[in-house]
Image (cartoon, coloured by chain):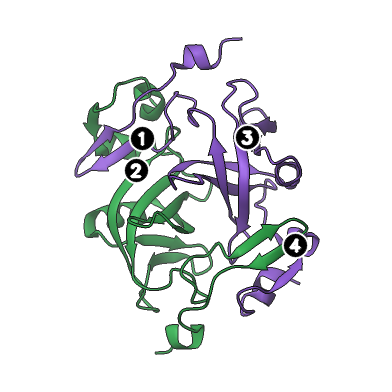
Chain colours: A green, B purple
Amino acid sequence: MNHFKEFERNEDGFTTPLENMLGSIKFNEQGLIPAIAQQFDSKEVLMMAWMNLEALKETLKTGRVCYWSRSRGGLWRKGESSGQVQELKSLALDCDGDTVLMQVDQTGPACHTGRRNCFFYAVEGESVKISGEVLIPPEELYKK
Amino acid sequence: MNHFKEFERNEDGFTTPLENMLGSIKFNEQGLIPAIAQQFDSKEVLMMAWMNLEALKETLKTGRVCYWSRSRGGLWRKGESSGQVQELKSLALDCDGDTVLMQVDQTGPACHTGRRNCFFYAVEGESVKISGEVLIPPEELYKK
């Protein structure tokens, strides 16, 4: 039973146990779901990364955003090496149960390049223009 | 050569031909890239869907958002059956070249359920609550 489909016609305010919905989430073949992080007050979209069920549960439990790193093949507690953590404000799933949207409070830059957000390659006509200043150089972000 | 990686240390305002960047986009095994649509003025995240290179090029060319429908296996000109189109205001790619973020002007509901956005399953503690009114019932949206 896909609860996302089942409940989509219910009214605003309808409530159901989280546990049921978690079981209906459509993870991809790698067991992952895309998760969008939006700065809760400015509404800036900061980044998109991936979560498995464990990362999603940890994020909800701890209130600190945890992704799944596809390159490292492990849990990625955002900010664990850079210090630039994401505090979770709220989390929602979409109609199909295949995308996560989070309102977060991002400390400093969300992007590994040291920019506030990852979407700095802006298409302008037949060109792409870098739009976004480096707030903290990567050398400083990732020094240990 | 991955131009996203190559150029990430360049400064704010750096410009390069779009054609080069399109060639470096990291489409997944199905040839698709996730595309986030954000209402340009309210900054509400409306939905996330997928694009192949053809859909992305058409979106940039026509200024009307076109996705790839995974269920139908074809181009999906948003609003072609519901009338609820997305006018493109601007488009950006992320640091890794594997996600698209669009600023759009959405006519009416973005969601197939008739809600303004797709992220209406809000997690609240151990529950999920529907948060978002149906603006136009699906029966009306999809009648022909």
A51 with respect to B96 (left or right)? left
SS class of the residue under badge 3? loop
Q: CA distance from mark 4 to mark 2?
A: 35 Å
Give the amino acid at mark 1. Phe
Which residue is the site of mark 1? B120
Earlier along the polypeptide chain: callout 3 or callout 1? Answer: 3
Find residue A92 and name its label. Answer: 2
Q: Nearer the viewer, residue A100 or B81?
A: B81
Q: CA distance from mark 3 to mark 4?
A: 29 Å
Q: CA distance from mark 3 to mark 1?
A: 22 Å
Q: CA distance from mark 3 to mark 2?
A: 22 Å
Give the amino acid at mark 2. Ala
Chain of the residue under label 3? B
Q: Nearer the viewer, residue B79 or B26?
A: B79
Frontmost of labels 3 and 2 is 2
Which residue is the site of mark 3? B70
Give the amino acid at mark 4. Ser
SS class of the residue under badge 4? strand
Q: Alpha-carbon neighbours of circle 3 within 10 Å: few (<14), some, or many (≥20)? A: some
- The image shows residue A24, relative to residue B54, as above or below, that is above
SS class of the residue under badge 1? loop
Which residue is the site of mark 4? A127
Q: Are marks 1 and 4 in contact (CB under 8 Å)?
A: no
Q: Are marks 4 and 2 in contact (CB under 8 Å)?
A: no
